[in-house]
Amino acid sequence: MIDVMPRRNFPSSELLGHRKPLGVVGGMGSFATAKFLEVLARKSRVERDQDHIPFICLSDPNIPDRSHAISIGSNAPLRQILERACWLEKAGCGAIAIPCNTAHLWATEIKQALSVKLIDMVEITRQAIEDSRGSEAHNLRSISLGTIASMQNGLYAGPNENDFGKECFCSLNKLQLDTIKLIADVKSGKVTEARDNLTKLVQAARSFDPDKIILACSELSAICGDLADDNDIVDPINILADACIDWWIAESQSPPDMLANRSWGQKR
């Protein structure tokens, strides 16, 4: 009889090998996390199971509401996000992804706490928009649809009176309120209704004639479907998945001794 029982307490390096997996801080929310992992697998375009990106996902949803905490000046969610990110680092992950836009309002603090790379979804989304616009990037007229914290704290470049005019700018308040309700519907499982309402929301945003509409909440990314293929729609979850794939390809091409000595974070 072949003994297939694993040894206890063996080093994680024996299980993971030289190529460190991606770490995913999930649970914000669980549906959005599942959507990110689906997009990551779909965009990898590999032929065999063995060629997919290895990842460790810690999806513990017991994290206080990020938007509410920011609105009252609380950092309570940050401590739990850091605990999860550091746990993933200790588990052997070579980079961390957080498929939650609002959590990136603490991106600086998260990067400082890690010794591995945070694949910053907001940073790479901004860069992707700039790359797509070229010399016209500084004149971008954009509308972000997300949590109240992300919209009010300028997570992404948002609309202002100079962009759209006073009358349109005042009308954006209703757009924000409708977005917040839609996000709550997704989190509570009203997905079919939310998909219909997202189409209406995007149509309302398009009435202001923006250059780009940013889906600045991963719940919106989770239900956007074919909308993500439209030229004026920016989906950070898609961009994050692409960046994770690029990171993994770069890591796979690096010699093992370079991987062992590399340090991505700010912590020393």
Image (spheres, rainbow, N blue to C red):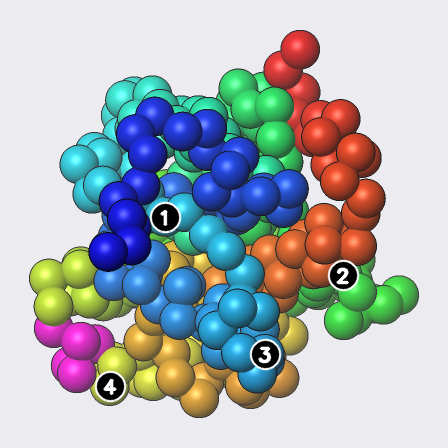
Q: Earlier in the sequence, mark 2 or mark 4?
A: 2
Hey, what amino acid is under mark 4? Asp
Crowd band around label 3 with a 10 angstrom C-alpha radius: few (<14), some (14–19), many (20+) = few
Q: Nearer the viewer, mark 1 or mark 4?
A: 1
Mark 2 sits on what residue? 130
Decide: is 168 above or below 119.
Answer: below
Decide: is 221 above or below 19.
Answer: below
Which mark is drawn over residue 46?
3
Alpha carbon distance from label 3 to label 4: 33 Å
Residue 20 coordinates in the image, percent (x, y):
58, 42
Out of 36 and 218, give the one closest to the viewer.
Answer: 36
Q: Earlier in the sequence, mark 3 or mark 2?
A: 3
Instruction: Look at the numbered disc 1 and give the secondary structure of its residue.
Output: strand
Magenta stretch secondary structure, dominant: helix
Q: Nearer the viewer, mark 3 or mark 4?
A: 3
Q: Is residue 69 magenta?
A: no
Q: Nearer the viewer, mark 2 or mark 1?
A: 1
Q: Earlier in the sequence, mark 2 or mark 1?
A: 1
Residue range (magenta): 190-194
Q: Earlier in the sequence, mark 3 or mark 4?
A: 3
Out of 208 and 13, give the one closest to the viewer.
Answer: 13
Decide: is 42 above or below 161.
Answer: below
Instruction: Look at the numbered disc 3 and give the secondary structure of its residue.
Output: loop
At horizontal 65% and vertical 55% (from top left) the residue drawn is 248
Decide: is 57 above or below 178.
Answer: above
Crowd band around label 2 with a 10 angstrom C-alpha radius: few (<14), some (14–19), many (20+) = some
Which mark is drawn over residue 196?
4
